[in-house]
Image (spheres, helix red, strand yellow):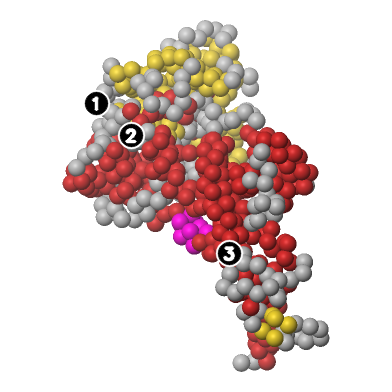
Amino acid sequence: MPNLTLDHVVKSYGKLRAVDDLSLEVRDGELLTLLGPSGCGKTTTLRAVSGFVALNSGRIFIGQRNITDIPPERRGIGLVFQNYALWPHMTVFQNLAFGLQLKKLPKQTIKKKIEKSLAMVKLAGYEDRYPRQLSGGQQQRVALARALVLEPDILLLDEPLSNLDALLREQMRFEIAQIHKQAGITSIYVTHDQTEAMVISDRIAVMNQGKIVQIGRPEGIYSAPASKFVAGFMGTTTFIHGKVSGTARERIVVQTDSGLSIQGKGEQLAAGNEVDVAIRPENIRFLTTPADIRKQGKENTFEARVTRASYVGELVDYQLDLKGSLLRAKGETANPLSEGTTIHIYIEPEQLSILKA
Amino acid sequence: MSLKRILVVAGELILLLLVFLVIFGPMMSLFIWSVAIRWYWPSTLPQEVGFDYWRQALGLQKSLAIGAVSIVPAFFLSLSIAIVVVCIAMLIAIPAGYALAKYRIPFAALIMFLFLMPNAFPQQPIFVNLLRIFTRVGLAGTLPGVILVHILVGMVFGVWITSATFRAIPPHLEEAARSVGAGKTRAFFRITMPLAAPGLLASAVFVFITSLDEFTGTFFIGLPWINTLPMTLYSSSGYNMQFASVIAIILLIPSILFMALIQRVLRAEYVGGMG
């Protein structure tokens, strides 16, 4: 499988730079996700690669082939749309056969290829159905099969799961990841859902205002966000503003505006820098017994008040008041804390990101 | 069956009958008039019934006594004009409607407004002006002149309905076709056209019926040389109720046939296909 390269791609609409000097390499067989809020330029980037958006400047390559000025139908790129875009007047078989017939393949070959790719998306035997006779999830699988049956060099998926209900969406994530692994096609996946991106991607490129602000493996981006924007976009994050007061044993010590002293990790920070401490629910540990509190010591141990406790099934979702900052935390369901309780919490400094404000 | 239930059913029947009368009453009177030979006050129904006017209108009988003329030539003239008008109007309306629906065209609203104009203003002043122009270029009183006028009047349906039809088709469907290797033209003819067909047919039918019934423009531009069916109806209706009724019924037939056709096509393809 060839790789896909975007080289200084620019697309403007009037004054707005939808894609702003973006360079990116999607490696062989890799699934790369463009993740970002709506309007960040991820869909425009995808449409530029598929050929429906003409660039202002920059170049796009599939392997060594420059496709910048090639029309969409000759790029050899498979597309999966958010609203499936199945042709309603054709059966599933006809939907899949259309592209194969354009390649002038013999009938038997077409039939075999369609059977194989319907089996891949677990829809064998659905050849004669019309799209309207299928559920949303099934329609999206047909759309995926329609793209895969042509064995494209590159596969582009534009928020393919966002029209499905939550339960199905979660299930389809794994299926798409599995199908991708099976087919091994170099792919770009666009989504605004960070969990979806984490589950599905080999690498994630977080976009904002037409630029890639951070790119890397899902774990890397989640655990070491490069900016407040990325930290805020990945997971439930509370920011506490403060100033760096010094360093202690390779840790950054922050004096917050609310009067707390918090330690965490950060890069290229010096005393006096304005920073935000990014606290996530999984960073917070409850210290329930006096022994726990004694054992933990004073470092990064605080007193907080429970302002809300919601039972969500496998865990309890808490909202804590830490000197005026509202944190989210997760607790076990065995001994739930009631609202109004004051509790000691410990914030693990190794997992705590200190970011330039 | 309880008394209440009987009353409800009776009430429903009476209501249904009233609705039926409101809709079909005037048409019934057309049918009765078309076969009335003698019908004077205070009789509820004609005193003498016969198909003399029908025979006369269809050119099967020639009697000067009842004053009707054969409408066969006028009917075929109207039909031919309508067919030519539909062909030309749709040839313009399909690309125009597609362009207005799919591309950002400068002054798109203004262009739409221009198509609407002949129907938005009182038609007489427009056609009086048109007559002056057509007289100068030699189109007044000619078949091409009348066809042009019908296209002008019918175009609003052509462009509005086709552009609405194309707009209703998600653009992603064509893009999906292109992503599997179809060029622009093929994507249009294999994907967009079949999906738009019912809407395009509906718009063609409206243009057809508009042309068949067109009066004002034909009156100014066509008369006295181009005598379409509505012209014949007008010139005879003042004095001859029977003959006018016959023509009205004949004018009704193609309209009803086409309405039935649209209904079938719209239900089967459009609603089903668009899911």
**Left or right of A345 in this view: A112:** left
**Left or right of A280 in this view: B19:** right
What is the three-letter code of the residue carrying label 2? Answer: Gly
Judging depth in this view, the residue of A284 and B246 nearest the camera is B246
Contact, mark 2 vs mark 3 (Cβ under 8 Å):
no
Q: Chain of mark 2?
A: B
Whether residue B119 appears in magenta in the rendering, the answer is no
Residue B214 spot, x, y in % from top left: 66, 54
Q: Which residue does the image show at 62% across and 67% down from the upper left? A: B70
Callout 2 crowding tier (Cα within 10 Å): few <14, some 14–19, many ≥20: many
Disc 2: which residue? B181
Residue B79 spot, x, y in % from top left: 56, 57
Q: Tag 3 or tag 2, which sits nearer the N-term?
A: 3
Disc 3: which residue? B72
Contact, mark 3 vs mark 1 (Cβ under 8 Å):
no
SS type, badge 1: loop
Disc 1: which residue? A1
- Does residue A160 appear in this view? no
Q: Which mark is residue B28?
A: none
Relative to residue A338, is residue B51 depicted above or below? below
